[in-house]
Amino acid sequence: MEVLRPQIVTIDGRNYRKNPIQEKSYQHEEDEEDFYQDSMEGADEPCDAYEVEQTAQGFRATVSAPSLLYKHIVGKRGDTKKKIEMETKTSITIPKPGQDGEIVITGHHRNGVISARTRIDVLLDTFRRKQPFTHFLSFFLNEAEVQEGFLKFQEKVLEKCSKDRGVDSSVFQNPKKLHLTIGMLVLLSEQEVQQTREMLQRCKEEFINDIAGGKPLQVEMAGIEYMNDDPGMVDVLYAKVHMKDGSNRLQELVDRVLERFQASGLIVKEWNSVKLHATVMNTLFRKDPNAEGRYNLYTADGKYIFKERESFDGRNILKV
């Protein structure tokens, strides 16, 4: 059961269990309606951060969003859109499904337009968080020497620990995909992919080159550690990575990249610092060799999935 090996969150040096909540599966439209009813309190506060244009007819604001999320603003039979319009005394124009464009909000009162914009932003943010990850930022660690060392590690584990519960070849990382993850992304349009490219390029120009001194960062992978708090029920085993010169430059670099992407909204802010690790064994790989993180997720049609994972006993691996 997942409740026996929850995610561990560290706050002010203390570890807390983040217990998953088993949710029922609902039809997506009903979820939207319930969410709108329960979560719009406090969403009417005027926000000066929004650009509102004054027109001959009143006021106008626009919202850029991937077309995949339009249906969450429309709601079942258009009820969500109608409710926002009625309560904020505005008119909302949404591009047709499959068409890219902007959501346009118009109204006679500036505060009404801002209120509608705030509510739409809350809905977009909520349903974006429910989408499965599409991309991740990382450093590749698939140099030939690293792959060779990893394969020796895998061979030794299977030779000495294959009789331990849950330990088999299916949970090992593909040696060609060894990497250091910086953060997970949900990119729902080509525009967002391009925005990510441009942001990475700006990071490179503004601080990555300075931190790295214009040279490759020399790191070593030494030692292994597990993600949860019970070595007898491990889901993720990772290799620890250190700078060869003993400096903190790699950590500084990835933390600044994470901070930049969190500020842009492309990465949801869950951590203030990147936990540098190279996954070598992951129980998600049993069913999906391409799995990357998040195992409690929502399907494209909004249904909640609680994915049961079969852990492995990592005590002998750690000992050997």
Image: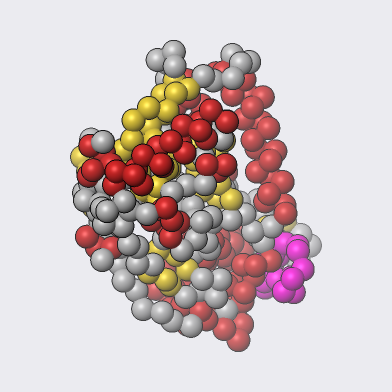
Which image quadrant: the N terminus?
bottom left
Write the residue at 65% across / 37% down: 199
Using the rendered image of the protein, determine whether residue 112 is visible from the camera's viewpoint: no
State the residue in front, 121 or 163: 163
Q: Residue at x 68, y 45 (%)?
A: 195
The answer to which image quadrant residue 271 occupies is: top left
Could you tell me residue 61's position as x and y percent? 68, 59
In this rendering, position of residue 114 left or right of residue 94: left
Q: Position of residue 42 (x, y in %)?
A: 42, 62
Q: Magenta span covers which residues?
A: 89-107
**Residue in the picture at 55% in, 39% down:** 138
Membership of 303 in magenta stretch: no
Query: For residue 13, what is the image quadrant?
Result: top left
Say which residue appears at 21% left-offset and 51% top-offset: 232
Q: Is residue 25 visible?
A: yes
Q: Is residue 127 left or right of residue 279?
A: right
Residue 256 location in percent, x, y? 50, 30
